[in-house]
């Protein structure tokens, strides 16, 4: 019973695209018709079965020929033949002379009901892998896995929704909406899928339609803080600031310790020119977020509110805190330059604007403000 171990980076094994592998020639070479038992290359009891497959062809080749073949290297999962050569010399230090023999094994997966050994829930395994990739922010890879899982069950609303989420994060909003629509055919009263469709519509510059789907989701659960948060954001995009503020206040009655909502409330209050109240909201957001990870954008927005109130020393401190967290953010640096101008520190302001222009030469605000500063010293 030949066993093949694969690294977990081979996503093509899940999607079904990978049908060959290159291995050092064994004492008993494989033959067409042999059955393979394939596993993730994990240690001891954590080893996970992938599938069973039939060998459809075996070609014996010399190492010197493998390391010249970029196409073959890419089929094996490497960028090019040079990368394959480097990795194989690490894996097979005693067997990478020019004349060393390797076998190119071609295989075809068996349907699960044709397996001889232990059967697995292949859909569940692929979904688990997809979820891990999604949570890691590897959306291009996870969407491939969700697509592979859907081949096992095209009517799984969870998988359709997650594939839509992936596509949204990749900027493919129309394809995401198609996934959400299929999911809603199966589960039409799922408030989360309805809201996800609303988000995709908003990103497609269709805020009115987005609000309609968000409203439908909210009717299913009026206390869903995620749906309410996005409702506030959609209303903000529509310029309905008072309605957005009411929405954020409603969330804060349900979840008063949510720093993101306090921050969003501060933004709305700033738009409504209620600067003192905005400052209180930003302070609350910072108080809550500082117990975890400080938020540079909130420090910056608090600085903006203080600048508007003429509290320049406090504003400068906020901008410095923001820059300490994101030292190459040209917006934060430019704001610091502005407050330094207000304080009459024109030479320091010029230094700030010079840094901005080094980071982002197309920042016209910094260029104009720098010229203005130069008139004063």
Image (cartoon, rainbow, N blue to C red):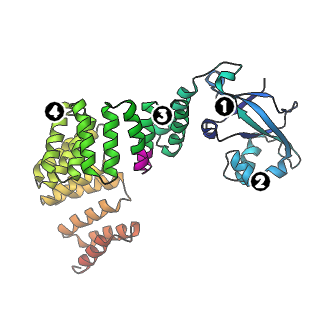
Give the magenta-colored segment's residue range: 167-176
Res. 131 mark:
3
Mark 1 to mark 4 CA distance (whole Å): 50 Å
Q: Mark 1: which secondary structure?
A: loop
Circle number at residue 41: 1
Is residue 17 shown left or right of residue 356?
Answer: right
In the structure shown, which secondary structural element does the residue marked by tag 3 occupy?
A: helix
Q: Quarter of the image for the C terminus: give it.
A: bottom left
Q: Nearer the viewer, residue 11 or 285?
A: 11
Residue pointed to by mark 2: 69
**Outermost bottom residue:** 375
Q: CA distance from mark 2 to mark 3?
A: 34 Å
The residue lying at 35 percent from left, 36 percent from top is 193
| Left or right: 274, with 27 as reference point | left
- Residue at the far front: name it: 185
Which residue sits at x=38%, y=34%? 185
- Answer whether labels 2 and 3 touch (C-beta < 8 Å): no
Quadrant in the rendering for residue 13? top right
Q: Are marks 1 and 3 in contact (CB under 8 Å)?
A: no
């Amino acid at each position: 019973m030949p066993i093949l171990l694969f690294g977990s980076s081979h996503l093509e094994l899940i999607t079904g695209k990978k049908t060959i592998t290159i291995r050092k020639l064994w004492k008993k070479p494989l033959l067409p018709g042999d059955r393979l038992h394939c596993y993730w290359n994990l240690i001891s009891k954590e080893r996970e079965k992938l599938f069973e497959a039939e060998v459809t062809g075996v070609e014996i080749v010399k190492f010197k020929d493998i390391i010249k073949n970029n196409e073959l290297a890419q089929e094996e999962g490497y960028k090019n033949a040079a990368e394959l050569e480097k990795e194989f010399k690490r894996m097979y230090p005693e067997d990478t002379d020019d004349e060393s023999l390797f076998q190119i094994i071609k295989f075809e997966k068996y349907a699960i009901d044709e397996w001889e050994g232990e059967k697995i829930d292949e859909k569940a395994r692929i979904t688990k892998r997809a979820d891990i990739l999604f949570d890691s922010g590897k959306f291009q890879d996870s969407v491939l896995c969700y697509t592979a899982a859907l081949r096992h069950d095209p009517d799984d609303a969870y998988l359709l929704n997650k594939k839509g989420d992936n596509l949204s994060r990749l900027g493919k909003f129309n394809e995401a909406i198609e996934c959400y629509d299929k999911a809603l055919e199966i589960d039409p009263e799922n408030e989360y899928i309805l809201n996800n469709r609303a988000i995709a519509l908003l990103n497609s510059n269709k805020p009115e339609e987005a609000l309609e789907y968000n409203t439908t989701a909210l009717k299913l659960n009026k206390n869903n803080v995620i749906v309410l948060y996005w409702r506030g954001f959609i209303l903000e995009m529509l310029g309905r600031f008072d309605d957005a503020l009411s929405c954020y206040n409603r969330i804060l009655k349900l979840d008063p310790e949510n720093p993101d909502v306090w921050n969003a409330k501060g933004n709305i209050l700033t738009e409504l020119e209620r600067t003192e109240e905005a400052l209180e909201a930003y302070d609350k957001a910072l108080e809550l977020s500082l117990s975890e990870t400080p938020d540079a954008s909130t420090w910056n927005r608090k600085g903006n509110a203080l600048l508007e109130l003429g509290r320049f020393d406090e504003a400068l401190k906020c901008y410095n805190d923001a820059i300490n967290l994101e030292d190459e953010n040209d917006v934060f640096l430019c704001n610091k330059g502005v407050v330094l101008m207000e304080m009459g520190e024109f030479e320091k302001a010029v230094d700030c604007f010079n840094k901005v222009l080094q980071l982002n030469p197309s920042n016209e605000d910094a260029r104009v403000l720098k010229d203005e500063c130069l008139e004063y010293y």
